[in-house]
Image (cartoon, rainbow, N blue to C red):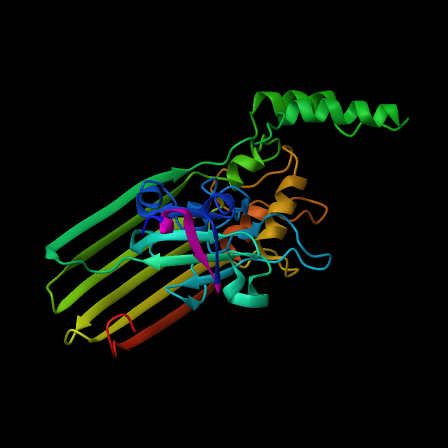
């Protein structure tokens, strides 16, 4: 027992603990639970050295994971993901169900997994019941997402003046008359001389909320952990949202001194809704690009609230955002793990 304090078993061998401290990192449950995040990947952001995570820009898109940087000329590669010892996706697990996450960074620590561990291994261990009285736990939060570092657009009157100046620099005639610029500045005719802030119309604050409830406990014979969770996220661009429902049951049964079994069941329902965007098939990305192309002299809405039509075939991206229809997608993910163990003799 004295020597084991200095050794760590890795794969099929062992190494000195002092040589392994930078190769294995562990994130405990309290770190994950105290972060206002939606996915497990986002919870690991900044919590593990050498683990690079690029968060997605909208709900329903998985963040990318890279351990120790790019390790291949052809593919940056992602770590092998294991949930309770079984390969699988972990992004939409209920964060409150996780006991710990261990990241194996080098070849020695990941040796047992062979070539699949070329880009590292991330081990997720979920919570299990303990010998205790029944207990119930609720965890939840509500937050607001806001777009940051947004460019500031000029007014329509200022745009018209600068546009005329650019025309003169090219030896061309002005596009806007002095009277036009005066009416843009006064706002007296908003239908014909608008002052539209397109980015303000496109990007909005959004709501994020997560709720989970769990029951756990156990006796000498049966230990259990049961949980249910709900995540809801809307994007900073309207008409994009996602709902995730989680159910988990981890049960351990001691039939007798040598005979044990456990069965874990989980189910995840993920519902994603996203605007179809522009007619050219580019989706929401096309709407964003078209919005950035617009200038404040173009009109988004008439004063009666209807969508505006701009001359010269200029597309109104706000109309496409709200009225082009939506993609609705539902993903069902269910899995079960059954384990049976028998101790033939003490220690085997």
**Which percent across, then down, holds residue 136?**
14, 53
Q: Residue at x 43, y 53 (%)?
A: 8
Quadrant of image for the C terminus: bottom left
Q: Residue at x 21, y 68 (%)?
A: 251
- Seen in the image, is 260 located left or right of residue 280? left
**Which percent across, then down, holds residue 264?**
28, 70
Of the pair 197 and 194, the residue shown nearer to us: 197
Of the pair 197 and 298, the residue shown nearer to us: 197
Q: Is any part of residue 332 visible from this angle?
A: yes
Establish if 137 lies above or below 202: below
20 falls in the magenta region: no
**Which percent across, then down, holds residue 65?**
54, 52
**Which percent across, then down, holds residue 237?**
49, 45
- Seen in the image, is 214 located left or right of residue 267? left
Q: Quadrant of residue 31?
A: top left
Magenta residues?
3-12
Establish if 342 lies above or below 144: below
Establish if 115 lies above or below 173: below
Q: Is any part of residue 326 visible from this angle?
A: no
Establish if 229 lies above or below 175: below
- Seen in the image, is 190 located left or right of residue 97? right
Q: Residue at x 51, y 48 (%)?
A: 23
């Amino acid at each position: 027992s004295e020597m084991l304090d200095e050794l760590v078993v890795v794969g099929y061998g062992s190494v000195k603990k002092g040589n392994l401290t930078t190769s294995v990192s562990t994130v405990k449950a309290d770190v994950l639970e105290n972060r206002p995040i939606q996915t497990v990947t986002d919870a690991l952001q900044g919590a593990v050295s050498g683990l690079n995570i690029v968060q997605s820009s909208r709900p329903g898109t998985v963040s990318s994971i890279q351990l120790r940087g790019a390790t291949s000329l052809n593919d940056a590669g992602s770590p092998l993901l294991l949930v309770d010892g079984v390969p699988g996706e972990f992004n939409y697990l209920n964060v409150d169900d996780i006991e710990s996450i261990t990241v194996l960074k080098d070849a020695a620590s990941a040796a047992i997994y062979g070539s699949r561990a070329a880009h590292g291994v991330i081990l997720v261990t979920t919570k299990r019941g303990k010998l205790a009285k029944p207990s119930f736990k609720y965890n939840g939060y509500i937050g607001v997402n806001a777009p940051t570092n947004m460019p500031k657009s000029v007014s329509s009157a200022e745009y018209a003046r600068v546009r005329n100046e650019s025309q003169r620099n090219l030896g061309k005639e002005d596009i806007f008359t002095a009277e036009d610029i005066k009416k843009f500045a006064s706002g007296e005719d908003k239908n014909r001389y608008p002052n539209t802030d397109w980015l303000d119309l496109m990007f909005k604050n959004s709501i994020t909320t997560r709720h989970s409830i769990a029951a756990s406990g156990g006796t000498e014979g049966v230990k259990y952990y049961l949980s249910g969770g709900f995540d809801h996220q809307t994007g900073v661009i309207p008409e994009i949202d996602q709902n995730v429902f989680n159910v988990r049951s981890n049960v351990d049964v001691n039939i007798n001194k040598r005979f044990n079994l456990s069965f874990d069941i989980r189910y995840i329902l993920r519902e994603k809704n996203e605007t179809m965007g522009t007619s050219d098939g580019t989706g929401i990305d096309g709407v964003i690009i078209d919005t950035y192309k617009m200038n404040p002299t173009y009109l988004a809405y008439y004063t009666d609230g209807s969508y505006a039509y701009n001359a010269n075939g200029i597309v109104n991206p706000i109309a496409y955002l709200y009225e082009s229809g939506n993609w609705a997608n539902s993903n069902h993910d269910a899995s079960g793990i059954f384990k049976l163990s028998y101790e033939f003799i003490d220690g085997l």
